[in-house]
Image (spheres, rainbow, N blue to C red):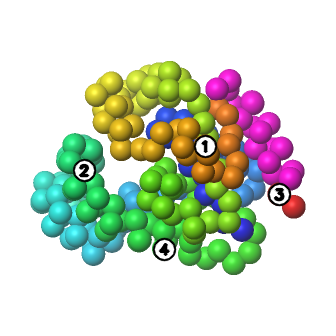
Amino acid sequence: MLIALTGSIGSGKSAAAKIFQACGFDVVNADNIARSLLENDAKIRLAISDILGKEAFEKDGSPNRKIIAQKIFSNKKLLERVESTMHPAIMKTALEGVNSGVRVVEVPLLFEKKLEGNFDLCIMVYCSDFLRFRRLRIDRGMSDAEIFARDALQMPQKTKAELADVVLFNESGLDFLNRQISLFISRLS
């Protein structure tokens, strides 16, 4: 079984993924796959360099994440070109080796990129904008401009919740999120 785990930036997808992993699930993070592809896949690196310019990579060949983020989050056409290059490779890697059991794949832009058809079940992590923005400011050091720019590229949370098969609420801490996931797992069979 393939389960997609999604939610808006700062909603707690990673916290939920850690809980699933602690419960023994095979968990894959699409953002980590993207990082690995940018660091190690020559074809992807060349394509991204063609789209964003050579400054997208440092002299040592490592991705210049700050430049990449600045370019793609300020130019929707560049973002679309990068995503059309990255997403097929990310999904291919995320789905490799699933023969038995359950794999949870953390996919931030699941519904935005119409990837839900690749999964048996879609779970969305939801929390208030106030709390999400607070987390992003405090935990990730993001400015309001960065937060609003990235959030504007995502589907509204309400729409994601309507599209999801299951919605987990992440308003009151990890204990509550953990109890919801435990209840979900108990009903899987």
Horizontal side, residue 116 vs residue 141: left or right: right
Q: Where is 60 relative to 99, above or below?
A: above
> Which residue is denoted by mark 2 in the rendering?
76
Q: Could you tell me the amino acid type at mark 4?
A: Lys
Find numbered disc 2 in the image and state the secondary structure of the residue it sits on.
helix
User: In front of the other: label 3 or label 2?
Assistant: 2
Residue 157 placed where, x, y %?
A: 53, 38
Residue 51 placed where, x, y %?
A: 17, 63
Do callouts 1 and 2 mark residues in contact (Cβ within 8 Å)?
no
Mark 1 → mark 2, Cα distance in angstroms: 24 Å
Q: Residues within 10 Å of mark 2 (few under 14, many from 20)?
A: few
Is residue 139 highlighted in magenta? no
> Which residue is denoted by mark 4 in the rendering?
92
Q: Tell me which label, 4 or 2, sits earlier in the chain.
A: 2
Q: Which of 121 and 86 is in front in this view?
A: 121
User: In front of the other: label 1 or label 3?
Assistant: 1
User: In front of the other: label 4 or label 2?
Assistant: 2
- Is residue 67 something one can see in this rendering? yes
Which secondary structure class fits the magenta region best?
helix
- Residue 188, which numbered label? 3
Q: Where is 102 relative to 69, above or below?
A: below
For the point 15% across and 67% down, which residue is it? 50
Q: Residues within 10 Å of mark 4 (few under 14, many from 20)?
A: few
Mark 4 → mark 2, Cα distance in angstroms: 24 Å
Q: Tell me which label, 3 or 2, sits earlier in the chain.
A: 2
